[in-house]
Amino acid sequence: MKKIRAILLALLAVTVLCAAGCSEDKKLSSDTGDSPAVTAEKGKLPNSLPENEKDKKSEKLTVKVYYPDEQGLKLQSVTKTVKVGGSDKYTAALKALLDGTKEKGLATIVPKQAKIKSVKVQGDTAFVDFDDNLVKKFIGGSTGEEMLVGSIVNTLTEFSEIKKVQLLVEGKKIESISGHLDLTKPVERMENLIK
């Protein structure tokens, strides 16, 4: 008699667990609109990141960023490997540029205090929004301004889908950084500056 009672209790426990598991599957599948079988078939586990999102978390990318030579005559590319992480590849490339360079004969032109607020791409144009330190902390003249703009524009136009860059400060278009270049319109790649 005790054995039968134990077997019945075990069967009851299994039934309760199965019922609880089934209702959880229904809840999870209702979030995606798929049945548990369809969810499993698609290779998706509920509450897990899609594969392409996982890849983005650890994706490494080799980018070319541009720095002026010490004479301020030409821009030279430096190859850097960046982690894309949570940011997009355009922001990662610009952050690599802002990190500066230790390459002999090259200088960092973007003010150290300048911060990237956002990078958005519409069509073939990248809209890069900096905080106001880009203008406030910039100390160069006309050549320095050309090198600064060229380093940002040429770094981003290394991505084939980007043909032009519109610089923004605090979300707004600016006329210029120090009064020498017209920045009211998007700037195309500045090949003439590249060494």
Image (cartoon, rainbow, N blue to C red):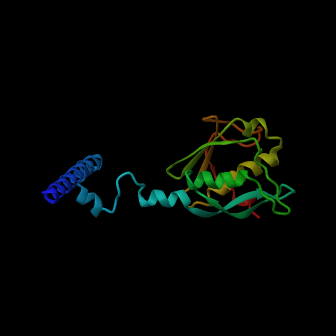
- Horizontal side of residue 130 vs 145, given as left or right: left
Using the rendered image of the protein, determine whether residue 40 is visible from the camera's viewpoint: yes
Furthest residue to the front? Answer: 1
Q: Position of residue 168 (x, y in %)?
A: 63, 39
Q: Position of residue 96 (x, y in %)?
A: 69, 55
**Where does the N terminus fall, quadrant-wise?**
bottom left
Q: Residue at x 55, y 51 (%)?
A: 86
The vertical placement of 89 against 135, above or below, is below
Q: Residue at x 72, y 41 (%)?
A: 114
Q: Nearer the viewer, residue 62 or 171?
A: 62
Q: Residue at x 71, y 38 (%)?
A: 176
Using the rendered image of the protein, determine whether residue 189 is visible from the camera's viewpoint: no
Q: Nearer the viewer, residue 19 or 99?
A: 19
Q: Kindly indicate the quadrant of the structure image that contains residue 190.
A: bottom right
Q: Residue at x 83, y 41 (%)?
A: 139
Q: Position of residue 75 (x, y in %)?
A: 76, 59
Q: Nearer the viewer, residue 154 or 14?
A: 14
Q: Position of residue 160 (x, y in %)?
A: 56, 61
- Horizontal side of residue 86 vs 68, given as left or right: left
The vertical placement of 27 against 71, above or below, is above
The vertical placement of 139 against 147, above or below, is above
- Horizontal side of residue 36 vs 100, given as left or right: left
Q: How many marks?
A: 0
**Where does the C terminus fall, quadrant-wise?**
bottom right
Q: Nearer the viewer, residue 49 or 124?
A: 49
